[in-house]
Every structure is written in C-alpha cells, then in structure tokens.
Amino acid sequence: MADLTTNFLGISSPNPYWLASAPPTDKEYNVRRAFEAGWGGVVWKTLGSEGPPVVNVNGPRYGAIYGADRRLLGLNNIELITDRPLEVNLEEMARVKADYPDRALIASIMVPCEEEAWKAILPRVEETGADGIELNFGCPHGMSERGMGAAVGQVPEYIEMVTRWCKKYYDRPVIVKLTPNITDVRKPAEAAKNGGADAVSLINTINSITSVDLDTFSPEPSIDGKGSHGGYCGPAVKPIALSMVSEIARAEATHGLPISGIGGVTTWRDAAEFISLGCGNVQVCTAAMTYGFKIIDELTAGLSKWMDEKGYTNVSEIVGRAVPNVTDWQYLNLNYVAKAKIDQDECIKCGRCYAACEDTSHQAISMSDDRVFEVMDDECVACNLCVDVCPVDGCISMVPMTAGEVDPRTGLEVQRDYANWTTHPNNPMAKAAE
Amino acid sequence: MAQGQIAPGIVSGRLSSDELTSNFTDLHPPLAPHEAAVAADRCYFCYDAPCVTACPTDIDIPLFMRQIQAGQPEAAGETILAQNILGGMCARVCPTETLCEEVCVRETAEGSPVEIGRLQRYATDSVMVGGSHPFQRAAPTGKTVAVIGAGPAGLACAHRLAMFGHDVVIHESRPKPGGLNEYGIAAYKSTNDFAQAEVDWLLKIGGISIETGSVLGEGVSLKGLAENYDAVFLSIGLAGVNALRADGVEKDGVRFAVDFISDVRQASDLVDLPVGRNVVVIGGGMTAVDAAVKSKLLGAEHVTIAYRRGRDAMGASRYEQDLAASHGVKIMTNVQPVAIHGNGAAVEIELEYTASHDGQLTGTGEMIRLPADQVLKAIGQKLDGAPEGLELDGNKIAVNGAGRTSMAGVWAGGDCAAGGEDLTVTAVAEGRDAAMDIHATLVS
C-alpha cells in the first residue's frame, strides 16, 4: 500500500486531502465529522476580526450548473466568511486540534488591510495550536467590497505587504490563497513569495452568475429579485485551476514554491493531476458539499491504488512530475503529425464525428450510404474534435505518423527531428536554426 | 365475489373489479419530468439519424429529444405532431422495437435504446394536457373532400387537408371515430379513453365533420361521393377477417380475435366481460398477442397462442412475444388447428404439428389436444367491401406513391391500400401524404 502521508510545509497529515475553507469547515461539529470520516486536514472557515460578525443573506447562497441527470458540475456561492464570533471559532479550533493532533488544521483569515488588524488576530490564532494559516485573498464577493478578499488578491503589492506582516507576527507556515479573478496569476504568486509566504493555495472561486431566471430576469441565486456575482467552483473549474497551478509551478520566479491545489477535485484522479502539476496537497470543497464527507474513502483508496499500480510509494514522488511537460505553444513540436483513426468495430454509427468535422472543422471524415465513417488522411489535421465528440471511449484515436512516412495532407515527409514555431520559416520572428 | 380463474367455460367476472383495474392500467406508465430529462439526455443527436429513417412518418426524433432536454416538452410535442398528428397514439402502440428504437445507436452500443416511444408520449401528452391545438387552419379554399373511414389514415388525411383550408367530411361506419385506435389495439396500451380524447383534440383544427354510421355501399357510394366532393380519400381498413379452415369452427366459443378485442375496448365494465378458462388463440401477429394477453388479464387460467410456423416467422415482434410470455401466455409454434371438439360448445382443440420444407408447410401427422373452451381466430384481416371499379394490387387497393387509386379524384391509404406495413404509424403517413397530393391537385 502506497503511503499517503503528506508533509506539506512541515505540516503532516495522513493523506493529501484537506477540506478547503468553506461551509464544510465552519464549526467544530462538521470538522469532527470530517476527521472521523478520514480527511487529512481542514482549513477552517475564514475568520474575521474581533467584533460583530458579518451577516449572510437569508435567501439562497448557492447556484448550480448541471450535467445530465442533475449531476452538479459547477457551484456558485455568495456566502461570506464565518458569521460566528471569533472567540467561538478559536475555542472550537483549539479543542479539535487537541483531539486530532495527527490532522492538519489551518486557520483561514481575512481581516482589514491594516497591520494592526493582523497583529491583533495572529497571536490568538497561534494559541489554538493550529498548524498554520491561510490568507484569504480570494473571496470575490461581499468582502472584496470592503477592501478584503479578492480586493487584496488583485493587487500584488498588498499581497506582499500583508504576507510580510503575517510572517512578522506569526511563526508557523503562512499560505496565501490566490484569486483567479486576475489576468496573470504568476504576479500575485510572486508577490506572496516575495512577502515570505511558505506556500500559495489556488484557485479561489471565480466570479460568476450561474443563470438568469427568465420569468423575473433575476440572476441566480436570486435574493428578492436581485442577484450578485458569486464564486464559482466544482468540477467545471478544474481546467482553469490546473492551468493556473502549472503557471506558478513552472514560472522562474515561483518555481519550487509549495502549492496547495484547489478547484474541482472530485475524484482521486483529479487530485493526482493537481499533484503532478506541482501541488504538495489538494483542498476539496464542492465534492464534499455535493456528496458528503464519505467521498474521502474513494479519494484515498483510489490514489493509493493508482500509486501502487505505478510503483509510487509516497505522494511526494508524484509532486511536479507533469510540470516539465507544460510548455509554451511556440515550443510544441510542429514535426509531430498524427491522424485520426476510427475503430470500425467500436463505431456505433451515430455520425457525430462526421457532423463535427463536416460542419465545423476540416471536412476530413467521409460518410457512406450505409453509415460507415472514415477519416480522409489527406484532409485530417488531427484536431481531435472527432475524438472529443465521439460518445464511445476509445473508438477514435489519434495515431502519430512515423518519421519517413509522407503526410497525405501536405505531401511532405514526416521529419524525425523536433522543430517548433520559433524556427519555422513562416514565422517572421524566426531565429535561424543553429 | 370473483369467479376465479378455474371456473369452467366462458364466464364473466373471473377477477375482481380492483384486479381488473390494476391489470388494465398503462403497460408503461408515463415518464415523470425528471425521468424524461434523463431519458432524453441519452440521445446522441445522431447525424442523419437512423431512427428518423426508420420512422414511417419521419419524425425528427433527435430534434424533439433536444427540445425535451432544453426544457420545452410542448415544443417537442409540436415537432412530433407536425409530422404525425396521431403521435400520441403512435407513442403508445408503435412497435418501436422494430422501428426507431431498433436502429437507435444506443441499441447498437449498449443493447438499450433511447426510450423514444415513451419520450414521444411524454412530449405529446404535454401538448394535449394543455388542451391547446398548435396548428392553424389556412383560409378556406371552398373545396370539400370526403374521407371514408375515421381510422388513423382517415384522420391524418383529414387533419392535413383541414390545415390547408379544405373542408372535410369523414364518413365512418362505426358508432365512434378512431378505427383500430378505438376498436382494436391492446387496451393496456391505450388507457383512459385516449383514442377518443385524441380524436377530439385533432378535430380542434376545425373544418372537419364526422358522420358516423355512414357505411360505404349502404346509402353512400363511391360514385356519388366522387361526384359530390372535390376529392375522395378511402381509408376503409380491413373489415374482413380470414376464415379458419378446421373442423368445428362453428362451435360456440369460437370467434374472431378482433371482435373479442373490440368488446374489451368497448366494455363499460370489464367485470361483465366473459372469457374462457382455457383460451387458445390461433395466429402469430400482434392481434394474436393482444387477444392472448387480454384473455390472461381478464382472468383466464390457461392461454395459449398456437402458430403454424416458427417463432421467427411470427408477425408479433420478439418484444410482443416476450410481453405475452411475461403475462403467462404459452406460445406454441409449428402447430396448426385441425379440429375443435365439443358438443355444441368448444371443449378441446386438436392441433397438428407442422414442418416446413422449402417454404411449404405440411402437417407431420402428430396431433396434440388442448383444453379450449374459447378459441380466438387471429389469422389476419382482409379487405372487405372495396368499391367496384378500383384496381387491386393483390388483395388491396392499388395506389401509387402518393396514394392515388386507379380512379381519378380518389385516393386511398391505411391498411386497405397496398404497400407498407399494417401499422397505425404507416396509416398516418399514408393519410398525410395523400392529403399533400390531394391538396396539390386541388389547388393546381
């Protein structure tokens, strides 16, 4: 059995799955249930400053996007940080940590962008015995309008400044949670690193309106006929999160900065993908909110099984394995030539590949009177759309041509050598191959 | 107190009223909205979809599936009804397992097609429940067309003609319109008097009047109609039934399955409907299965379908055969009736085993006797009372592709016309297409 024990920033947890700072981690009751279920750690729902807590709306806080059979693909929320008194949260955190010393317990914090505010709260958090803190610079709604959350996360200078304060007044690991609602995620990550952050976590939720009620013309979720953009999460955001994680993992300025991956982790496979792109662990929220804490059984068993099959004995062996394979478009091998191949035994003759190719791509699939669909190699550019729309897994595949074969589309021989856009003759900026 | 299954002879009230009600409810209950959404989502929206090709009325099935997926079942219903005005009944009675669903790529992939029939019902029901009629009549043309027979072909033809602004008079020999939708067809496929509700809904187009009790050859003649109307459409069905050649067919308890089915459909209370203890149905088509299953549902103890050829040659699809089997009907193949024994009333049927050599069926000489107090003959219907002067093609009225008969101004469609399977959906297609040709002729 592969060892799922994870050491992230010196914080040990029995597996790499932490529950993200969100409703599932809002109070002792839930967190105890999560730990009993087997979660490796939790990031406690974001704490605010001492004083009257924030208030939430008293109507719907969530909106959803569904796939077939109401399978939840995307969730959006307009909930704020914890609406319970700071003292209550701190007392509960201390009790839980004492009872579960082997689990990671991280305090998420969001207080005003003033040094005094951070100086005031950090020692109190430290007293709870929490293993570290996560700075919520990502929350896109409600708090950002008060100069917190994403309002900080969108200004790298603020990130660096606040991170520095935290490192000054707090001795344990500081994780900076990043918002995706920016142009280039590498900038805030770099700012966090410059401020002394031990790690970044991403992505926080994405600005979103899930739908519009076409009777009332109110955005959803609707509060008395009005809606406000919320934060989008769940399986739908995973590709965005993977890309942002990879950018930070491979950028020169942030390469090696520990990352806690967040964004649509639903199965063990998602987790393995995040980890391979450089994450030391992952945080989960929507999957737990959709299915309950019991999903941890599949998450851990699945990852362990896959690691056994691949011969990995520790999660750390997977971290960053895919990072060297993430590159810029201009470095992709333009001498790589593939062709779509349809397995006629697998084909169920729905014709979706034909419609997609004929209507929207390269007119490279033929259709006979008796519904046999075949790829015309002299037209196929290997765009992969037919593979993507085919309902049968494995029916259509992309088969690379071997060097020396002639590509019937171009009439050119497939070259063995790697060559990319930077040296391509069509590129006016091309550098001569050396 | 119910008589029970083992009461001898042909008696009514074998089962209690509650049991009968339960037995004759919908074979397939309607889909709930979420079930429909999930079922419709399985459609792959195939290119040039095989299901459409397989549908005699060319319903754009992928489109209506997508409309259900997109939350507009009424729009889906309109898509269906625009091609097949009796799409509601067809959703219930079409042998989808040999038409659209047989060729569904999901059937190819998983052995489980998209439930096109049930989804069609969901869509058409959502139109009819609302009570609205989505089609409008064009401005009156002043032309009048006579339709003979208010079955599926006649109704489809009449509706399409009415849409074009023509006036239509339907002459129907029976007391109620609907044809086999009303008098044939398994009761468990068309519950709650759906056939009449569908006719009422169809007539909302306006411009159609129905004269019931109007029998061709008795008061109305084709010649007279042709003179008085701008066009005539014959959809008189197959009023005759093939005779069974066996000794003792005149005995009490021996009757035509279509009459038995009609009695079931028209019964005001099924408790009053008599059925045998030991029922033997002769034949291998859908009528045989319908009659057999109905007998079982009414409380017959033993019901046997006796068919002279092998299973593969049966007119009833494998699905229908399984349906019969699941209701406890025994299917005997390669047996033909030789004699019905009994003193006045049938008591036993004597069957001879058969063998087929080069397509020729011969008796093997081996006999078997089954108890049979009721024998239902379901060996096919035939054209009866076709007006003189029309060319026939085999035993049916000869027509060209658009339903034109050999007589100018006279079209024909449905079971009475040559070509096509004898299915409700085929009749609808023929009625509709003849209407298009009639319209083109009238306005040219």
Image (cartoon, rainbow, N blue to C red):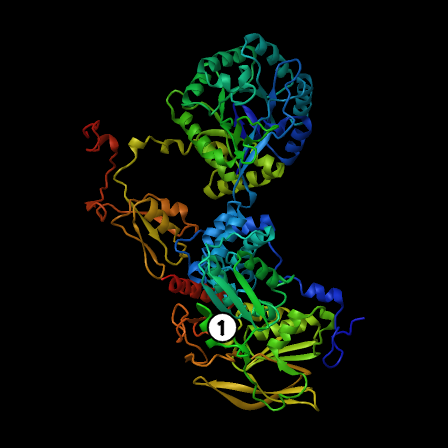
Q: On the rendered structure, is B164 left or right of A213?
A: left
| Quadrant where the image shows the N terminus of chain B | bottom right
Q: Can residue A266 be seen here?
A: yes
| Quadrant where the image shows the C terminus of chain B | bottom left
Q: Residue furthest right?
A: B1
Residue found 53% across the figure and 33% down from its top: A212
x, y (%) of residue A425? 19, 33
Q: Quick one: A325 or B158, which is closer to the camera?
A: B158
Q: Secondary structure at mark 1?
A: helix
Residue found 20% across the figure and 33% down from its top: A426
How many numbered badges does the structure rendering display? 1
Q: Residue furthest top?
A: A116
Disc 1 residue type? Asp
* Vertical relation: B232 (above or below) A148: below
* Vertical relation: A78 (above or below) A267: above
Q: Quick one: A58 or A121, which is closer to the camera?
A: A58
Q: Quick one: A186 or B374, which is closer to the camera?
A: B374
Chain letter of disc 1 in the image: B
> Which residue carries the number 1 mark?
B415
Near mark 1 (Cα within 10 A), the count class, few <14, some 14-19 or many ≥20, is: many
| Residue A287: quadrant of the picture | top right
x, y (%) of residue A40? 59, 31
x, y (%) of residue A243? 42, 31
Q: Can residue A105 be seen here?
A: no
